[in-house]
Amino acid sequence: KMKSHYFQLYSNAVACANQLAPGLPVYLSSDSDNLASMMQNVSIVRLPSSVGDAKALHIDNDYDQGLHPPSSFYLIFVDLYIMSKAKCLSHSGSGFGILPLRISGSMCELTHVEHVCQAMNETR
């Protein structure tokens, strides 16, 4: 049931991004460990190369900070950098999604958890 919830959430996020900037590739970043297995067959989606390599860490989580060296969090900053260069951003409204908007100054954004975008049916 949880896998279905995440698939719907990611599919809607991608559909919203595609509505904002039709035809452009979508870079999908998430703090969920099962992102790659769910979205790898969607042709417009580009996943971070690190997906599937390690457990998704949360820099704001004291538990993760205490168990991992600072270098374990580098990929978070890579995601933020890539997202800050995006033409448009579909985000959940969390700080992680809003920070790249503030860095870039872009006004092209949509909070995908507040909208239902058209269904996505394109696969590889």
Image (tube, rainbow, N blue to C red):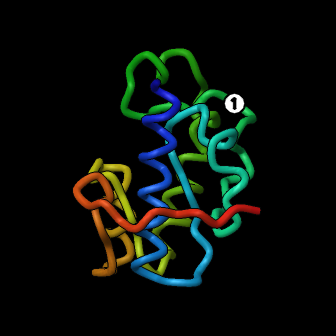
Residue 104, above or below 99: below
Residue 70 versus residue 116: which sits nearer the camera? 116
Residue 86, above or below 42: below
- The answer to which quarter of the image holds residue 34 is top right
Q: Quadrant of the C terminus?
A: bottom right
x and y percentages locating residue 66 in the rendered image: 48, 16
User: Relative to residue 58, is residue 124 drawn left or right?
Assistant: right
x and y percentages locating residue 77 in the rendered image: 53, 52
Residue 21 versus residue 70: which sits nearer the camera? 21
The residue positioned farthest toward the left in the image shown: 114
Q: Secondary structure at mark 1?
A: loop
Q: Which residue is mark 1?
A: 54
What's under tag 1, amino acid-wise? Answer: Ala
Q: Could you classify mark 1 by the number of other residues whose Cα lies within 10 Å: few (under 14), some (14-19), or many (20 or more)? A: few
- Residue at left offset 39%, top offset 65%: 90
x and y percentages locating residue 47 in the rendered image: 66, 55
User: Relative to residue 72, is residue 93 drawn left or right?
Assistant: left
- Residue at left offset 46%, top offset 82%: 21
x and y percentages locating residue 57 in the rendered image: 53, 31
Tally the numbered discs. Answer: 1
- Residue at left offset 29%, top offset 52%: 113
- Residue at left offset 51%, top offset 42%: 7
User: Relative to residue 70, is residue 18 drawn left or right?
Assistant: left
- The answer to which quarter of the image holds residue 37 is top right
